[in-house]
Image: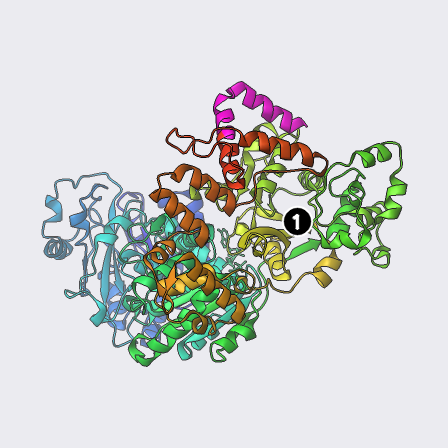
Amino acid sequence: MVSINCINKEEMLLVGCQDKKISSTPKEEKKFVYASKDDVMETLKRCEEWNSRARASRLVAAQARQHPQEFKEKMSSLSGQQGMRNVIPQERAAGSMEIPFKEGLIAQIKDGVEESMPSHLSQQLIYKEFQPIVNTNTQILGQQSRDILKTKIGEDVGDIPRYKEHTNVSYLLLPIYFHHEMHDMVEDEVFILKFVEPFLQVYVCEYLVDDIWWQVLVHLTGTGHGIVKQNLWPQNRGIDLCDISCCHRDIQVSLIFQLEMMLEARRTLPMAESKAHFLELMRENDVVVVSGETGCGKTTQVPQYILDDMIQSGLGGFCNIICTQPRRIAAISVAERVANERCEPLPGSHGSLVGYQVRLDNAQNPRTKLLFCTTGILLRKLVGDCDLENVSHIVIDEVHERSVLGDFLLIILRDLLERRSVNKSSKLKLILMSATVDASLFSHYFGDCPVITAKGRTHPVTTFFLEDVYNKIEYHLASDSLASLTTNPMPKKKVAKNIVDNSHGRQNLIKSGWGDEKILEEDIVNIHYDKNLYHAYNERTRQNLKNMNEEVIDYDLLEHLIQHIDENYEPGAILVFLPGMAEIQLLLDHLTSSRQFGGEASEWLLPLYSSIASSEQRKVFLSPPKNIRKIVVATNIAETSITIDDVVYVIDCGKHKENRYDPQRRMSSMVEAWISKANAKQRGGRAGRVRPGICFCLYTRYRYENLMHPFQVPEMLRVPLVELCLQIKALSLGDAASFLGKALEPPREESVCSAITTLYEVGALEGNEELTSLGYHLAKLPVDVRIGKMMLYGALFGCLAPVLTIAACLSHKSPFVSPKDEKYNAERAKLLLLSEKIDGGNGQNIASGQQSDHLLLVVAYNRWMKILKQVSMSTLLLIMFIRKFH
Ligand SMILES: Nc1ncnc2c1ncn2[C@@H]1O[C@H](COP(=O)(O)OP(=O)(O)OP(=O)(O)O)[C@@H](O)[C@H]1O
């Protein structure tokens, strides 16, 4: 077996020791060598490749023969040097030269103990003081070692009934020396690790000690302390070892190699360069704003820097970091990635320091030190514990999103920071992060706190705008295309402002069929078209740009582009951004019905939107079989924080759904809108995470540079504040107007007044803004207050089923469509429906013949359900077939 203990960054001490199984290794080869780091790495690599302990052992031994004297001198000189961590003290080093590692850096207990050794035994396999263990006999543990183990385990290892010959389980004793210079830390600790696999590739080296080995220890102890200050240990100073028992089996060679690779990858991220500066700023300030290009490592690295820093300063026990993510999928996938980078088991499982919590899914354990959660979850925590006493750090990721909840949280946190800053021992630290943040705004809000900007990005992303895409794929925008202005001519002025309700205009179809496209083109021009911008582009592209209706998504173009990428570009997944579920489904229908993406390939056409169950959402992270290209079609839930590691191509349609106030219905609803530049940057950033990527924007460069807002208008300024004011009351945060006056960008006074008035009208408030019982219940329903009240009354009056149907329809958009030329027929159909019986859920007819829009919704829904039940499977298939090929 081989262990490596390093002397400094350039040199390592290889500890070679004969393995019982390598009977061919001559005894005299049980020597210790030092070798260059490269040699060691090379050796290990070869060991890995050969997968042969015997050969590796010989290799090590051969090196030992080459440098014995040098090694001896090096050891003596280094051990005397100040500040050298993990240098083995001179007397031990000297001793070890005489009797090769008599102290036993490594001890193997006979041939091992059965894998399924009961956890109560392995739980005790650790002791605090360094006790040299003589390992002169690799077959049977030395008597001294056995005695030590006996006192720790309470049984003679030789007597363990499950202890049997010829298993692969071994124990590794690791004296930990690297805290000598930190006098308040435990000096010599010995860990005994149980390995299922041979020791051959198990090694510790100096440059790993700081990072990897430290993490191995942290991982092993599961306490988050590693070697910790004495006063942080549980009373008996024994680490609670229940975690260790579960880790042992996993701590195989691969773990250490994996850790090493991960650390190497982490060190190359742009954020790593700013690590020291960030930690310094964080120590000196309560709030720090972190910005940096997408993919530079904010989300995955910054929380870990904090965690590691706390552990290394011996404060792991006090550390409790919460990192918020705007969406569930981000919280889960980032937690998994971070656990993976630390080579920990899955988030929340036994032995992991990382966890996540989202609605309906919670992966935490009592020792979770780094929790990823959604903003809503953190707000809920604040309801239960308004001072968040146990939380040491809060990291708010993607602060640029400016959701109502996000801005609301910032008000609460600013107050909380003030309260917590009084008590110096339990100060709260807040870190705000985003790639596209308006840093000065946030910095100013938090008392001009420092801003740190990470430079550079991981991999370059090439961006093509619509004109490039048109040119590249030689696309012809047909005049009868839904995305062409010629389809539905409108007066010039209106074209750009309205979201055009396009349909196949018969007139145009006929005209274009007769080659009359020219006539149409002359009349209708995209008002954002400026011919001077497109000299370099071909005629067809210019024609397309002139005729296109920017407000309509061109599915033909999308399909063409995806096919083009699939045929002409290197392997790599494609991520398409569309505004909503319906649009996603439409594109997927288009693709599944195509020859290229139908059949087996269609299994890798993956939708991704918020209402898909988390388990389904996770499919997007899986890898497809070779020769199949994964295509993920997503809403903006894939826009921030997440890394789908095989995504190389992003297609951005430039639209999303935004919550806006609808004055007609006096309700907020989701409308389709152009994204901001910040969103566009984030979307592009999903490519180029693990290698260079390409982003195809289906909007013009002109739009990006001149028409898109730099940031989205904060949600708090564009939606009614009724629900928010209700929450403020439910959380007893005082007068709503003054509370919201403390926001980053406070809403207008009239908006707050109007919200309060609505709450009084609904009956949620009474007296001096006091919450009523109705208000209390409404605060728990995630719907508009008026709809919530209707639902509560529906339950009270025993007609919940139809009321829920109405509530669902009102919360979403109308299920009815009335095309312009079919208006009359649509109205007639509605009237006909109204003459039907309406079932109140209990078989009663609740409103036959009533002229009510709301009851009409119930009738339509019930009819639809009835048809669904009646339609046989084959009919359904037929419908699907027709839709596909229509
Ligand atoms: N699941 C993963 N698989 C592979 N690599 C990953 C994964 N997650 C992150 N990475 C790597 O880590 C890098 C940093 O990711 P991270 O999410 O921390 O960046 P970020 O700066 O927060 O980006 P953003 O602002 O876009 O959220 C990525 O560019 C990628 O190289």
Q: Nearer the viewer, residue 122 or 758?
A: 758
- The mark tally for this picture is 1
Q: Is mark 1 within 8 Å of ligand 1?
A: no
**Quarter of the figure with residue 724:** bottom left
Name the amino acid, label 1: Cys
Q: How busy is the neighbourhood of tag 1: few (under 14 within 10 Å), some, or many (20 plus)?
A: many
Name which residue lies at 31% across and 60% down: 218
Query: Is residue 807 visible in the rendered structure shown here?
Result: yes
List x then y, in percent, for residue 593: 64, 29
* Rendered-image quadrant of the C terminus: top right
**Depicted 813 relative to depicted 402: above or below:** above
Reading the image, the residue beneath label 1 is: 653
Query: Taking 118 as reference, is 655 left or right?
Result: right
Above or below, comparing residue 18 to residue 737 in the picture: above
Majority secondary structure of magenta residues: helix
Residue sitting nearer the eye, 342 or 362: 362
Q: Is residue 37 left or right of residue 689?
A: left
Report the span colored magenta: 863-886
Q: Is residue 873 magenta?
A: yes
Residue 843 coordinates in the image, percent (x, y): 39, 28
Task: Report x, y in % for residue 448.
Answer: 50, 80
Front-most of residues 755 and 105: 755
Q: Residue at x 51, y 42 (%)?
A: 809
User: Residue 541: x percent and y percent?
Assistant: 82, 47
Task: Name the residue: 56% across, 20% down.
Answer: 875
729 to 541, vertically: above or below: below
Identify the secondary structure beneath mark 1.
loop
Foreground pick, 115 / 684: 684
Whether residue 81 is visible to the viewer of this picture, yes or no, is no
**In the visual, does 428 lie left or right of 552?**
left
- Please say whether residue 422 is one of the residues in the magenta stretch: no
